[in-house]
Image (cartoon, rainbow, N blue to C red):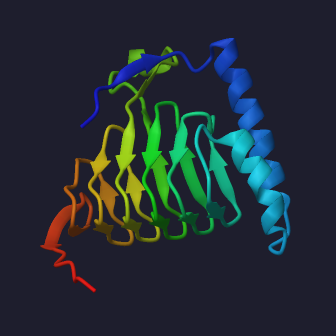
Amino acid sequence: MHPFTEINPFAPELVAARKRAKQLCQQLNALRADQTKARKPFYQQLFAQVTRAYIEPNFFCDYGSNIYLGEEFYANHNCVILDAAEVHIGDRVMLGPNVQIYSTSHPLDPAERASGKECCAAIAIGDDCWIGGGAIILAGVSIGAGTVIGAGSVVTKDIPAGVVAAGNPCRIIKTIHQTTS
């Protein structure tokens, strides 16, 4: 688990950064399905790191500037990445539809929550992972390379490399035995 830090989401620079990201997401989501080349400039403006990616509409994020995408990243429809903290996604990662990645949380204490404070912690997803549709990945979580997260799972704690994990909360179901070609 990555450590949590506190941020003030009402800081003027963060408000401006979220507005910029929302506008870029709207433009990206408005592209026709056949406008694949037109997506790349939006990806480059939005994300901290991206080379080859394809993201189906609709895609939403808070800032984009805290999202680091590896090679051949794919996100199916209705992906949400709340990136108040850094979100690092490895090479050849596939996200099913409606995957949600939340690097943010809020204080448990009602008075602190009412103050507007947010807590955030980085998320890391290793190379060659497949995150099933409707999965939710919470702040501070790391998922090891080659792991499969089952559809509808809620990932609240780190998941090691090379396993299938599923459920709410997400638990390891089995180890993946890799084949050699």
User: Up-down: is 74 above or below 103?
Assistant: below
Name the spot of residue 21 as percent of width and height, x first.
72, 37
Q: Is residue 61 left or right of residue 34?
A: left
Closer to the camera in the image, 110 or 167: 167
> Is residue 133 at all visible to an observer of this figure?
yes
The quarter of the picture where the C terminus appears is bottom left
**Picture residue at 49% right of the left edge, 54% below the top:** 100
User: Up-down: is 31 above or below 109?
Assistant: below
Closer to the camera in the image, 161 or 181: 181
Q: Is residue 13 left or right of residue 122?
A: right
**Picture residue at 74% right of the left edge, 40% below the top:** 45
Name the spot of residue 120 as percent of width and height, x first.
41, 29
The extreme front residue here reads 181
User: Up-down: is 152 above or below 65?
Assistant: below
Name the spot of residue 69 as percent of width and height, x first.
53, 50
The extreme bottom residue here reads 181
